[in-house]
Image (cartoon, rainbow, N blue to C red):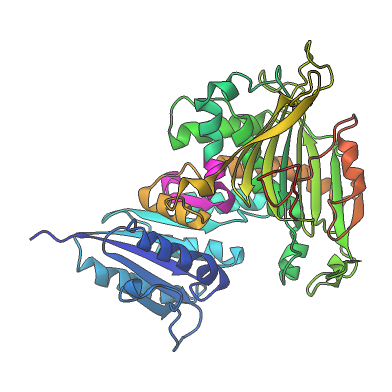
Amino acid sequence: MKKPTGNILVIFGATGDLANRKIFPALNEIKKSNKLPENFHVLGCGRKERTNNIFDKLSNDLLDNTNYFKLDPYVESDYNLLSYNIDQLKNKYTTVNVIYYLSTPPSAYEVIVNSLINNKLNIENSGYRRIIIEKPFGKDLKSSKKLNKILTNGFKEKQIFRIDHYLGKETVQNILVSRFTNFIFSALWNKDHISYVEITAAESIGIEGRGEYYDSTGAIKDMFQNHLLELLCLVTMDEPKDNSSESIRNEKINVLNKIRKIDFQDDIIRGQYTESKTKTKKFINYTDNKGVDKGSKTETFFACKLFIDNIRWKDIPFFVRTGKRLPTKVTEIVVNFKNNENVFSKNNENNTLIFRLQPDEGLLIKFNLKSPDEKSLIINKNLEFHYKNLGEDVIDDAYETLILDVFKGNSMLFSRSDFVEKAWEIVDPIVNEINNNKIKLYGYKSGTWGPKKCNDLFRNKNTWRYPCKNLVNDGEICEL
C-alpha cells in the first residue's frame, strides 16, 4: 500500500507573540474550514526548554500532531534535532512537504536561513521546501540585498514567501478584480478621468510597548516602504498579461520604476504625536513611551505626494499617509474622479470610489442624484457594498489567506525580491534627508489627523478625506 504525503509546518519562535496571536489562531480557522492539507504536523522550535504546553492556543484536533523541542538558532548542532524530527515523519510518508516559518526577530533570519542551507534542509528531494519570512525585509537597501542574497543561495524565488499581512485582506485582493473586470471602472482608470488618489492607513493606537523597535524604525520604514507602496501598485498597475503571480508582480515593479523623484521639501510631511486629553482618555507624548529616546525625532506620522511618470498617470498626484494615534483605525483607498460640468449643475460634487480595507471592509461609491421635489438641487449619495454581507465563507483574517497560499504555492500576495529592493531605493533617499536634518518634524496632538501642515501637500482647494470607522452611511453618521 502506497504511503500518503505528509505536510509539516516548522515554526521558529513558536513560543513568541506572533505565533500565539496570529499563526495558531489562523491554523485553527483553516482546520475548521477543512482546508488544511492532510497529515498535517506542527514542529515548534524555541530557544528554551519548556515543560508547559506551548500549543495551548491550537484546537484539540491539531494537538496530536504537534511537537516542541529546544532549538537555539545560533547553535549549529541544534539543527540536528530538527533534521531528526523531519526524518521521523519521513518514515511514515512517501513524500514530506516542509514549510519553515521564521516567527523570530529579523536579527535571527540570517543565521536560521544559513543553517537550514548548511544542513541541507532546503533540498527538495522529498516534497517541496518553502520558507516564510515576516517583514521587515531588511532595514535599508544594503541589508535587504544581503538578506535576499542569503535566501537565494539555497532557496529559489518560488520557495520564498515574504509575508505582508496587508495583502491578505479580501478587499486588497479585490482591487485588481474590481478594476479589470468592471468596465465602468477600467474604462475610466487613467489621467483623463481621475483627479487624484488618496491612500490612508490610520491607527488609533500608539506604539503599544514596542518603543525600542519602533523608535529605530518609524512610520516610513514600518508602513510606507511595504504596505503603502504595495497598495499604490495595486491601484495604479497596468493589466497583467495573464492571471499569474509573476505577471502581476512584474506589473507592480513597472509602477515602482516609474515613480518620479520625490520633492523632499514640499511633498513630504513628518509628524510625531504629543500628549492630549479628552473627557474619557489621556494620551502621553510619544517620547514618554518606554524604550523611546527622550529626544527622539522618529516620525509616528508620514505623508507624501507621489507622481507616476507613465502614459496612464502622467501628472496625477497620489497622496499617501499613515500614522499612530489618529482618530480611528481605518485603511482605505480613495479614487477622486474629475468634476463633471454639465447642463444640470456646474457645482455638483465629483464622483468618488472608496476601497475600504479595514474595518467594515467593502466598497463605497459616491454619486449625484436630483433631490426629491427640487428641480435644480443635486445631492450626493452613497452606494455601498460590505464583505460581511457575503456570508460565513469570507476569510476574515489575512494570516489565514496567506498561510493557505503558501500551502498552495501561490506567491501572488507575497513580495518578490526585486520589489523589496526597489521599494528601499525609493525610501533610502528620504531617510538620508531625515538623517541630515533636511526634513522637518511637526508635532500633532494625539487623536487628531496629524500635523495641520499635511493639507499643504494639495496646494489647491482639495484636502484629505477624513474617514469614519463605519463605511455605512459614510458622510451622514460618523463613528470614531
Q: Nearer the viewer, residue 23 or 295?
A: 23
The magenta span reads 153-173
Number of disc labels: 0
Q: 49 and 308: which one is in front?
A: 308
Indicate left or right for 466 with 329 as reference.
Answer: right
Identify the residue at image location x=74%, y=54%. 479
Q: Is residue 262 magenta?
A: no
Where residue 175 sits: x, y (%)?
56, 36
Q: Quadrant of the C terminus?
A: bottom right
Which residue lies most toward the bottom here?
A: 51
State left or right for residue 199 relative to residue 441: left
Residues 178 and 263: in front is 178
Q: Is residue 325 visible?
A: yes
Q: Vertically, is 430 above or below 403?
A: above
- Residue at left offset 52%, top offset 54%: 398
Picture residue at 62% right of the left edge, 33% below the top: 235
Of all residues, the one furthest to the top in this rendering is 343
Q: Is residue 141 visible?
A: no
Q: Is residue 301 left or right of residue 8?
A: right
Give me the residue at 68% from left, 50% from top.
470
Report the residue that reaches farthest toward the front: 373
- List x then y, in percent, for residue 348: 80, 23
Residue 88, percent across and down?
25, 72
- Is 258 placed left or right of 287 in the picture? left
Question: In the rendering, at what x and y percent does residue 266 appear?
Answer: 89, 36
In which quarter of the view is residue 303 placed? top right
Figure quadrant of the N terminus = bottom left
Q: Is residue 283 depicted above or below 195 in this figure?
A: below
Is 170 part of what is drawn in magenta? Answer: yes
